[in-house]
Amino acid sequence: MDFVPARYVKEGVEELDAEKLTPLLRLRYNNAIADAVADLGSADQIRRVFVGFQKYLYEARPS
């Protein structure tokens, strides 16, 4: 899943829109969604991770 945060850094917060998940997976896996599922789990699992990790990007860190 390092690919998505790297795209976020490069392209901005719009890359984290849930509608971008499938295009990002297609980009990363050369249009082979089956390969993404084989590597990352079911579509539901991938979506949960994609949405779930975003809260950590915006979480305040203790000083």
Image: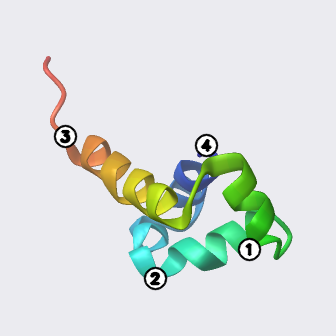
Q: Secondary structure at mark 2?
A: helix
Q: Residue at x 47, y 66 (%)?
A: 12
Report how far apart the C-alphas of labels 4 and 1 lie in the structure. Answer: 15 Å
Separation (CA) of disc 3 from disc 4: 18 Å
Specify the amino acid type for callout 1. Answer: Arg
On the image, numbered disc 2 is attached to which residue?
19
Q: Residue at x 32, y 51 (%)?
A: 52
**Residue underneath mark 3:** 59
| Picture coordinates of residue 19, whole percent (x, y) | 46, 82
**Image location of residue 11, percent across then percent down:** 55, 67
Mark 2 or mark 1, earlier in chain? 2
Q: Nearer the viewer, residue 39 or 14?
A: 39
The correct choice, above or below, for 44 with respect to 3 in the image is below
Dot 2 amino acid type: Glu
Three-letter amino acid code at the position of disc 4: Asp
Give the spatial CA distance, label 2 vs label 1: 12 Å
Viewer-proximal residue, 11 or 55? 55
Label pair 3/4, CB-CB below 8 angstroms: no
Residue wearing tag 1: 26
